[in-house]
Image (cartoon, rainbow, N blue to C red):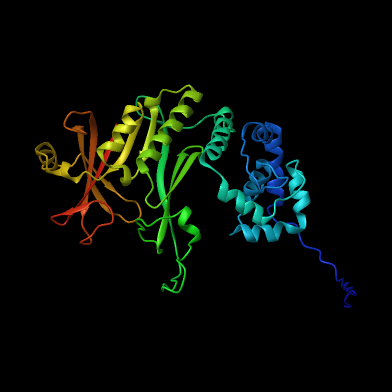
C-alpha cells in the first residue's frame, strides 16, 4: 500500500484560531440586541467621567459580559485571546473599538455604586419581564398548595497575599485587593483577606435573581433584606402570594433577627437554626424524652437520624411562633461540623414557617 503525499505549507503570518467561546458571545449579543437591552443600557445608564476617551459605558459593559461568558481565568488572558478579533467582537454589539486594558482599569476603579445599581435594576427588570420556562416549577404539599423555593446563600472567597518587607526605609505596602476584600472569617479556605457574596437562586429553574458582594464578612442582614425585596418583586411579577415563596437559608441566618426580617415580608422560610439554647426549654426536653416522630436513614451512608417535631415554638419571648424540627444522631467526633454535641449525641435544629 502506498501512502498519499503530504504537503506542508509554512508562512510567517500568524493565523490565530477563533476562541471557542466566540459563538456563545455572538448568540448572547444577538439576544441583547433583539430584546433591546443594549439600547436600554446606552439610554438609561449614565456614568460621566474624564479620561475615558471616546468610549461609553456600553463599551466597558460588553467587554465585561464577554469576559464572564468566556471563562478565561483573568482579564489579561481574555484580552490576549481576544486581541486578533477585537474589531469583530465589538461589531457583534454594534460598537467600533475595544477599550484598552488601562482604560478599562480606570473605568472599574472610578465606577460608583449608583451606576452599578442602575445596571442591576435594568437586568433584573428584564429577568422578571420574560421567562424561558412555561412554568416556574415548585413543590406541592399534601394539600395541593404550590411552594416556590428560593435559595439565599452567602459564600466567601479567600485571597492569598504574599508577605512584603516592612521597614522604615520602605513605603507602606499597597494591596490591590484592599478595595474589595477585608479580613474576615475564612472557613476552610486559605488566605489573608476574604470577600463575601450573597446569591439569590430560584431553585427550580436555576435562575439567578440577584447577587450582592461585600468586603470581609459582609453585611449579611443588609444583603438579606435586599434579597427579600428581589423575591417579593419576583412573586408579584408571577402573581403569586409571598406566603408561598419558601426562602431556604443556611446557618448564617439561624438567629431570630434575620428570621424576623423574612417573616415581616410575609415570606415562608426554612433555615438551619443555631439557637441551641432552645434545647434547654422544658417543652423541648419533654418532646425529646418521647420516641421520635420519624427515623430517617440515609440511602448511601446508612446513617440514622431521629426526628422530633415541635409544632409550635416561640421565635422570641413575644412571638411569632415557628415550627422546630430536631434531628439527632450519634456523635462520631468531639467537634461536629454541623449541630451541637451533648452527651455523645449531635443535635441539629431546623426552623420553618
Q: Residue furthest front?
A: 169
Q: Is residue 215 left or right of residue 4?
A: left
Which corner quadrant holds the N terminus?
A: bottom right
Residue nearest the viewer, comparing 88 with 283: 88
Residue nearest the viewer, comparing 190 with 347: 190
Residue at 74% from the left image edge and 49% from the top image edge: 89
Quarter of the view holding residue 243: top left
Quarter of the view holding residue 253: top left
Q: Is residue 32 left or right of residue 163?
A: right
Q: Is residue 241 left or right of residue 290?
A: right
Q: Position of residue 84 (x, y in %)?
A: 77, 58
How many discs appear? 0
Residue nearest the viewer, comparing 5 with 49: 49
Q: Is residue 322 left or right of residue 164?
A: left
Residue at 46% from the left image edge and 57% from the top image edge: 178
Q: Position of residue 295 (x, y in %)?
A: 24, 45
Residue at 56% from the left image edge and 38% from the top image edge: 115
Residue at 47% from the left image edge and 40% from the top image edge: 201
Q: Against 137, is 334 above or below?
A: below
Which corner quadrant holds the C terminus?
A: top left
Q: Position of residue 278 (x, y in %)?
A: 17, 41
Q: Position of residue 277 (x, y in %)?
A: 16, 44
Quarter of the view holding residue 142: top left
Amino acid at each position: 500500500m502506498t501512502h498519499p503525499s503530504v504537503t506542508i505549507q509554512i508562512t510567517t503570518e500568524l493565523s490565530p484560531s477563533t476562541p471557542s467561546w466566540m459563538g456563545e458571545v455572538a448568540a448572547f449579543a444577538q439576544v441583547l440586541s433583539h430584546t433591546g437591552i443594549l439600547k436600554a443600557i446606552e439610554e438609561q445608564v449614565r456614568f460621566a467621567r474624564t479620561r475615558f476617551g471616546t468610549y461609553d459605558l456600553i463599551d466597558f459593559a460588553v467587554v465585561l459580559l464577554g469576559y464572564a461568558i468566556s471563562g478565561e481565568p483573568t482579564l489579561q488572558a481574555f484580552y490576549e485571546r481576544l486581541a486578533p478579533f477585537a474589531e469583530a467582537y465589538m461589531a457583534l454589539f454594534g460598537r467600533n473599538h475595544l477599550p484598552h486594558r488601562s482604560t478599562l482599569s480606570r473605568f472599574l476603579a472610578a465606577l460608583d455604586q449608583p451606576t452599578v445599581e442602575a445596571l442591576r435594576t435594568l437586568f433584573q427588570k428584564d429577568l422578571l419581564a420574560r421567562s424561558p420556562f412555561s412554568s416556574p416549577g415548585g413543590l406541592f404539599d399534601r394539600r395541593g398548595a404550590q411552594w416556590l423555593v428560593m435559595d439565599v446563600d452567602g459564600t466567601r472567597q479567600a485571597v492569598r497575599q504574599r508577605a512584603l518587607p516592612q521597614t522604615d526605609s520602605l513605603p507602606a505596602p499597597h494591596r490591590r485587593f484592599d478595595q474589595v476584600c477585608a479580613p474576615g472569617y475564612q472557613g476552610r479556605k486559605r488566605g489573608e483577606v476574604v470577600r463575601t457574596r450573597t446569591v439569590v437562586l430560584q431553585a427550580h429553574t436555576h435562575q439567578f435573581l440577584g447577587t450582592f458582594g461585600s468586603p470581609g464578612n459582609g453585611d449579611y442582614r443588609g444583603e438579606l433584606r435586599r434579597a427579600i425585596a428581589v423575591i417579593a418583586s419576583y412573586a408579584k411579577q408571577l402573581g403569586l402570594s409571598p406566603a408561598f415563596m419558601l426562602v431556604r437559608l443556611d446557618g448564617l441566618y439561624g438567629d431570630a433577627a434575620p428570621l424576623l426580617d423574612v417573616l415581616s415580608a410575609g415570606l415562608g422560610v426554612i433555615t438551619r437554626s443555631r439557637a441551641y439554647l432552645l434545647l434547654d426549654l422544658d417543652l423541648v426536653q419533654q418532646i425529646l424524652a418521647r420516641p421520635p416522630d420519624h427515623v430517617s436513614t440515609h440511602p448511601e451512608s446508612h446513617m440514622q437520624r431521629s426526628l422530633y417535631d415541635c409544632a409550635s415554638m416561640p421565635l422570641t419571648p413575644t412571638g411569632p411562633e415557628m415550627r422546630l424540627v430536631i434531628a439527632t444522631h450519634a456523635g462520631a467526633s468531639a467537634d461536629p461540623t454541623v449541630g451541637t454535641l451533648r452527651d455523645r449525641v449531635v443535635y441539629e435544629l431546623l426552623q420553618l414557617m
